[in-house]
Image (cartoon, helix red, strand yellow):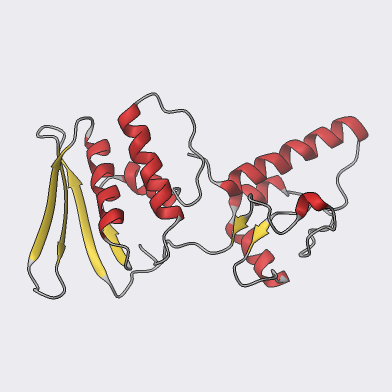
Amino acid sequence: MTRPQELVAELIWKARVRIRELARCDFKCIHIPIGLRSGQITKAMLEHLLQENEALQFALDSFTGQIPIHRPAHKIFNQDAKFTLSLKSVQSRKPLEALTVFTDASGRSHKSVMTWKDPQTQQWEADVAEVEGSPQVAELAAVVRAFERFPEPFNLVMDSAYVAGVVSRADQAILQEVSDTALFELLSKLVKLVSHREQPFL
C-alpha cells in the first residue's frame, strides 16, 4: 500500500536524480500538488506538510530552490487535477470523545470480532464473523466492518500491529498487486472507506 505523499516524494527524488545526471544541476522550482477544500494553501500549511512528511523531507533534502504555494499557469495544473496531496487526515492523533470499538481475531477458530458499548443502552454489543485466513486477515475484516458500521467518529482499538499499520496508511492509498484475492478485497474496501470518510477516527 503506497500513500500519495510517498508517490509524489518518489517522483520528486527520481526527477532530481535524473536532472543531475543529464544537466548537472537541480531544479530551481518544484511544485507539489496539494488539494484543499477551503481554497488556497498558505506558506504555513506547506511548512507543516514538509515537517510532518518524512518521504518528502528525504526527496527534498538539500533542495535550495523554491516550492511555490500558487499553481503554475500551465493547463496541466488546472483546478480539475485529480492527483493532489491532502493536508487533512481523518485519522486523529489523540483519543476522541466518541464511541470506542475493539477488534480482535482468532487464527484457530477463524473468528473475526468487533465489540463496542452501545451509548443508548449501555450494553455491550458484538459483531462476530468467521473469516478464513491468518489472524491478521480476520482482524482486518473486523476493522473493515467497523468502518462500514460506524460513519460517526470513533476510537478503534486493535492488538495487531500489522493491521494498525495498514489502517494508518489507508487514506488515499494506492494498492500494489496482491495475490490473495480475499486480502485484496479487504484492503480495497478499507482504502475506499477511509479515503471517503467524513468523520474522524483514532
Q: Quadrant of the C terminus?
A: bottom left
In front of the other: 199 or 54: 199
Left or right: 42 with respect to 85?
right
Q: Position of residue 42 (x, y in %)?
A: 71, 71
Q: At 10% from the left edge and 61% from the top edge, which residue is drawn?
A: 125
How many numbered circles does the render carry? Answer: 0
Q: At 61% from the left edge and 55% from the top edge, which residue is drawn?
A: 85
Q: Is 190 located above or below residue 88 in the figure?
A: above
Q: Is 157 located above or below residue 11 in the figure?
A: below
| Residue 92 image-quadrant placement | bottom left
Left or right: 192 with respect to 3?
left
In front of the other: 21 or 6: 6
Q: Position of residue 5 (x, y in %)?
A: 60, 49
Left or right: 86 with respect to 128?
right
Q: At 11% from the left edge and 32% from the top edge, which residue is drawn?
A: 108
Q: Position of residue 24 (x, y in %)?
A: 91, 36
In front of the other: 74 or 165: 74
Is residue 63 visible in this depiction of the protein? no
Q: Is 97 located above or below residue 29 in the figure?
A: below
Q: Position of residue 59 (x, y in %)?
A: 70, 45
Left or right: 152 with respect to 111?
right
In front of the other: 170 or 136: 170
Is residue 120 visible in this depiction of the protein? yes
Q: At 30% from the left edge and 31% from the top edge, which residue is drawn?
A: 182
